[in-house]
Image (cartoon, grey):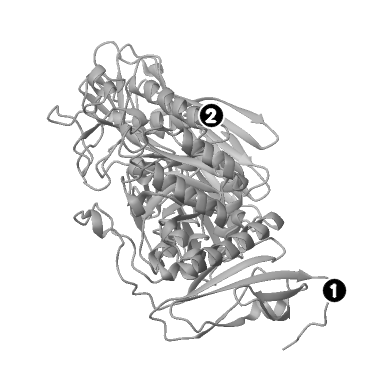
C-alpha cells in the first residue's frame, strides 16, 4: 500500500495506491479543524471517468481501469504540484479486454492518464486537471469526460449555494452557467467552494444529484456536447477545477475574500490599473449610424467632461472581413479620430467581429473553405446578421483573423478592443450554429469542434495580448456563446467580458448582474452596455450603478445641456481624483449585508424566444434596497447603496462587517458633501442606519479611517 499526499497550510488531499495498483483519493481534509470532506475510501475510488471510442468499439473507462505507474512532485515559489501517471490495464476486473479489436488486443499501454494536483502556498486551494495520451495508430474519440469525481461527506442540513449564489438547494446539476458553487455543512460549521475552469457552454457541474457524489467535467447534456478526437501520439489536457476550504466563516465572506483573492491574483490576466474609470461606447446610442462628424464632436465633449476612453462600436468599417473605414461615414479614414483622441489624451476603442465575416468580403470570397457549416452543409449564421456567415476558428482562418485584428490595433493605436459575434453557438438562437460540421478543418468531428473553437478563441486572445500589451481585450457574450455569462476560463485569456446590453434607465437588472457575477470574477473585468448619460436618472442612480464595474456609458454627448456636462464633469473629476488616492475599482464586497437587487434575472434565450428590442428593456419592479462596498482591508473606501423606485422604506440599517472593531472612522455623504458622523468600528459592525429620500435614489458613503487623536468618537 502506497500513500501520497499534497497539502498547504489549510487543506490536504490524501491518496492511496493499493496492491492492485488502484489509485484513489482517500482524504480531503480541512487541516485547521480536521474535518473530512470525503466519505470513506470505498465510495471515492473514481477520480475520473470517460467514454472512449476506437472505431465502432466503445468502452467506459474509470479510475479502476488504470494502474498506477509513478508520481512526482515539483515545488515552486507559488505552489507544489503532484503529477500521478496511470496506464490503462490490459484487462479489467470483469475480465474484458478494452478495445479488443484490430491492433489493440490486450495492449493496454496505448492509453495513459496523468492527474495533476496543485496546492497553493498563499491560498486555501488545491487545483486539479488531467491529461489523456494515446499511442494508438488510429484516432480515439473521448466523450463524457469528468476529471473530478468524489463522494463527499453527508451531514445534517448540507446545502449548495448556486446560480451565481442566488439560490440554495440540496442538490444541483448545471450546464453552461455556474463556475463556482459553495457547499455548507452547517452542523459542522464547515464549507467548501467547488469550481470549474471549463469555458462558456462547455461547463458541467453536478453536486449531490447522484447521492453524495460530486462531478466536474464537460457539458454532456446541452447543445455543445464535449468530444475530443485524440490523434495518434496526441495528448489531450482538460481544463482545471479546484477546491477552496473554509470553516467558522460565512460563505459569503469567503467568496468575497479568499475566492476573490485567488481569482484576482492567480487566474485573471486583467489588472485593475489597466481599466479606464470612464468609457463611452457608441452602440445603443447610434447603433451603426456613426460618422466622422458625430465621433469628433463627441470626443471633444468627452474630453471636456474628463472621460478617459471613447469606443467606436459596430459600423465604423466597410464590411465584416474588410476592416477598413467606411468611405462614406469616414471619408478621411480614422486618422482624424486617432489624432483627436491623442490630442485629448483619450484612449481609442474599436469593435471588431472575430468569426462573422460578410459574405461579400474579400476573405469570404477567397477562402470559402473556412466557413463554419451546419448539419445541412450550409453556412452558419447568427440571428439578425444574415449578410454575414460564421467562419470556423478551428480552421486556418484563426491565423488570418489574428493578423487582421493585430494590424488594425496597431494601425489605429487601439487601447480598448471589443471582440464580438458568435463563434461556437448563437446565444440568441438555441440549437443553431452549434459547432462546425465541416470535414476539412482541424477538428475530426462536429462535436469535437466545440471545445476546439473555444481554445482557438483563447489562443487568439493570448497572442493579441502578447503583441499588444497596452490594449484591453473585451470578449463579448455573443462571441463566448452564452448570454449574461462570465467565468473563470475567460478571464485567464481576455481582460474583460461585455456581458449584456441593459439600457433600462433604472439599472436594477444591471446591478443584480454585477452583484452576482462579481462574486465569481473581479468586478473590473465586467463590461455592461448600460447607462445612457442623456437619461435624467443617470445623473445619480445610473452614473453610480455603472461604477460597480468598469464605468461604461452610452449617450450622444451633444445632447447634454450645459448643466448636465458640468454635473458629470464634477463627479467624473471627483471619482478620478479619489481613484488616484485609492483604486476602489480593485475591490468589491457584498458579504451577506447587501442582497442582489430583487429585479428579475435577465432572460435566458435557451428557454425563451428571442426579440432583439426586448432584452432587459423593462420597467423597474425592484422594491428592496441593494448596494456594494469597495473597501480596503482596513475598512476605508466607498459604500454605495440604492433605493429602488418601488421601495416604501426611506430608511435601512446595514451591519458593516468589513470595519475593524478597534479602529475609528469618519463616514461622509459624498453627494451631499456632509459628514454623517464619527464611529468606532464595533458600532459600524453592529449597524449603521441610512436614509434615502429619492425614489429611485442613491447614497454614496466615503469611509475614512481616523488616527486615534484625530477626533473624539461619538459612542451613540
Task: Check the image and name the residue furthest to the bottom.
Answer: 716
Q: Is residue 57 above or below residue 125?
A: above
Can residue 143 be seen in the rendering of this structure? no
Drawn side of residue 259 relative to residue 484, left or right: right
For label 1, the crowd category at 10 Å Cα-Cα, with few meaning under 14, some 14 to 19 and many 20 or more, is few
Query: What is the x, y in percent for residue 588?
Result: 57, 59
Q: Position of residue 216 (x, y in %)?
A: 40, 44
In the picture as drawn, the residue positioned furthest to the right comes out as 709
Label 1 sits on a secondary structure element that is: loop
Give me the residue at 50% from left, 56% from top.
Answer: 518
Q: Position of residue 420 (x, y in %)?
A: 36, 40
Q: Is residue 152 left or right of residue 688?
A: left
From this view, report whether residue 525 is shown above or below residue 470: below
Residue matched to label 2: 84
Instruction: Give the position of the C terminus as an image quadrant.
Output: bottom right
Determine whether 133 is above or below 202 in the image: above
Which sits in the foreground, 192 or 688? 688
Specify few, some or many for label 2: CA neighbours under 10 Å numbering under 14, 14-19, or 20 or more. some
Foreground label between 1 and 2: 1
Q: Nearer the viewer, residue 573 or 507?
A: 573
Of pointers 1 and 2, the one earlier in the residue sequence = 2
Q: Where is the N terminus found, in terms of image quarters?
A: top right
Q: Which mark is residue 460?
A: none
Q: Which residue is mark 1?
A: 708
Q: Can residue 18 be seen at all in this image of the molecule?
A: yes
**Please, what secondary structure does the residue beneath circle 2 have?**
strand
Identify the residue shown where x is 12% and y is 30%: 376
Circles 1, 2 touching at the beta carbon (< 8 Å): no
Residue at image x 55%, y 36%? Answer: 117
473 to the left or right of 478: right
- The answer for how far apart the CA atoms under marks 1 and 2 are is 55 Å
Amino acid at each position: 500500500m502506497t500513500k501520497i499526499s499534497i497539502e498547504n497550510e489549510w487543506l490536504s488531499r490524501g491518496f492511496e495506491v493499493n496492491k492492485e495498483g488502484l489509485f484513489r483519493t482517500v482524504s480531503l481534509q480541512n487541516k485547521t479543524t480536521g474535518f473530512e470532506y470525503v466519505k470513506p475510501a470505498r465510495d471515492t475510488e473514481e477520480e475520473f471517468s470517460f467514454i472512449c471510442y476506437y472505431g465502432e468499439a466503445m468502452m467506459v473507462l474509470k479510475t479502476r481501469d488504470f494502474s498506477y505507474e509513478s508520481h512526482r512532485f515539483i515545488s515552486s515559489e507559488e505552489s507544489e504540484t503532484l503529477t500521478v501517471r496511470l496506464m490503462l490495464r490490459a484487462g479489467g476486473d470483469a475480465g474484458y479486454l478494452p478495445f479488443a479489436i484490430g491492433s489493440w488486443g490486450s495492449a493496454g499501454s496505448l492509453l495513459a492518464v496523468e492527474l495533476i494536483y496543485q496546492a497553493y502556498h498563499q491560498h486555501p486551494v488545491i487545483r486539479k486537471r488531467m491529461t489523456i495520451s494515446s499511442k494508438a495508430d488510429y484516432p480515439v474519440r473521448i466523450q463524457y469526460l469528468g476529471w473530478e469525481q468524489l463522494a463527499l461527506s453527508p451531514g445534517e442540513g448540507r446545502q449548495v449555494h448556486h446560480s451565481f449564489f442566488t439560490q440554495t438547494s440540496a442538490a444541483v446539476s448545471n450546464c453552461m452557467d455556474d463556475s463556482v458553487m459553495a457547499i455548507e455543512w452547517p452542523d459542522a460549521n464547515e464549507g467548501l467552494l467547488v469550481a470549474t475552469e471549463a469555458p462558456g457552454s462547455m461547463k458541467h457541474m453536478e453536486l449531490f444529484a447522484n447521492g453524495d457524489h460530486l462531478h466536474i467535467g464537460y457539458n454532456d447534456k446541452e447543445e455543445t456536447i464535449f468530444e475530443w478526437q485524440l490523434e495518434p501520439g496526441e495528448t489531450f489536457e482538460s481544463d482545471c477545477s479546484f477546491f477552496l476550504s473554509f470553516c467558522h466563516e460565512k460563505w459569503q465572506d469567503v467568496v468575497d475574500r479568499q475566492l476573490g483573492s485567488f481569482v484576482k491574483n492567480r487566474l485573471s490576466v486583467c489588472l485593475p490599473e489597466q481599466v479606464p474609470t470612464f468609457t463611452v461606447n457608441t452602440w445603443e446610442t447610434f447603433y451603426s449610424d456613426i460618422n466622422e462628424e458625430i465621433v469628433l464632436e463627441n470626443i471633444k465633449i468627452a474630453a471636456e467632461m474628463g472621460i478617459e476612453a471613447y469606443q467606436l462600436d459596430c459600423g465604423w468599417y466597410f464590411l465584416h472581413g474588410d476592416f477598413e473605414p467606411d468611405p462614406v461615414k469616414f471619408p478621411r479614414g480614422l486618422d482624424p479620430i486617432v489624432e483627436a483622441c491623442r490630442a485629448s489624451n483619450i484612449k481609442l476603442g474599436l469593435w471588431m467581429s472575430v468569426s462573422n465575416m460578410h459574405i461579400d468580403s474579400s476573405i469570404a470570397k477567397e477562402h470559402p473553405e473556412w466557413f463554419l457549416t451546419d448539419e445541412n452543409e450550409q453556412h452558419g449564421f447568427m440571428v439578425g446578421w444574415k449578410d454575414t456567415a460564421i467562419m470556423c476558428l478551428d480552421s486556418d482562418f484563426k491565423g488570418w483573423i489574428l493578423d487582421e485584428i493585430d494590424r488594425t490595433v496597431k494601425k489605429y493605436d487601439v487601447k480598448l478592443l471589443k471582440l464580438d459575434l458568435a463563434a461556437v453557438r448563437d446565444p440568441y438562437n438555441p440549437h443553431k450554429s452549434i459547432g462546425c460540421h465541416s470535414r476539412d478543418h482541424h477538428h475530426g468531428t462536429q462535436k469535437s469542434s466545440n471545445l476546439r473553437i473555444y481554445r482557438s478563441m483563447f489562443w487568439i486572445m493570448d497572442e493579441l495580448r502578447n503583441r499588444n500589451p497596452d490594449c484591453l481585450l473585451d470578449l463579448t457574450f455573443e462571441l463566448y456563446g452564452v448570454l449574461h455569462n462570465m467565468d473563470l476560463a475567460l478571464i485567464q485569456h481576455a481582460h474583460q467580458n461585455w456581458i449584456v446590453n441593459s439600457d433600462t434607465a433604472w439599472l436594477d437588472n444591471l446591478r443584480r448582474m454585477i452583484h452576482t457575477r462579481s462574486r465569481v470574477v473581479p468586478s473590473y473585468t465586467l463590461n455592461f452596455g448600460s447607462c445612457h448619460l442623456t437619461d435624467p436618472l443617470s445623473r445619480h442612480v445610473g452614473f453610480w450603478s455603472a461604477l460597480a464595474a468598469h464605468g461604461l456609458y452610452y449617450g450622444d454627448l451633444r445632447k447634454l445641456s450645459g448643466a448636465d456636462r458640468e454635473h458629470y464633469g464634477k463627479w467624473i473629476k471627483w471619482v478620478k481624483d479619489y481613484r488616484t488616492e485609492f483604486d476602489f475599482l480593485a475591490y468589491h464586497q457584498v458579504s451577506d449585508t447587501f442582497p442582489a437587487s430583487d429585479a428579475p434575472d435577465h432572460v435566458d434565450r435557451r428557454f425563451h424566444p428571442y426579440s432583439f428590442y426586448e432584452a432587459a428593456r423593462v420597467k423597474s419592479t425592484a422594491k428592496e434596497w441593494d448596494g456594494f462596498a469597495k473597501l480596503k482591508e482596513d475598512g476605508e473606501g466607498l459604500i454605495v447603496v440604492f433605493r429602488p423606485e418601488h421601495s416604501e422604506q426611506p430608511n435601512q440599517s446595514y451591519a458593516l462587517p468589513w470595519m475593524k472593531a478597534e479602529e475609528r472612522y469618519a463616514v461622509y455623504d459624498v453627494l451631499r458633501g456632509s459628514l454623517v458622523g464619527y464611529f468606532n468600528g464595533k458600532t459600524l459592525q453592529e449597524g449603521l442606519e441610512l436614509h434615502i429620500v429619492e425614489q429611485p435614489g442613491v447614497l454614496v458613503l466615503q469611509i475614512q479611517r481616523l488616527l486615534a487623536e484625530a477626533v473624539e468618537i461619538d459612542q451613540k
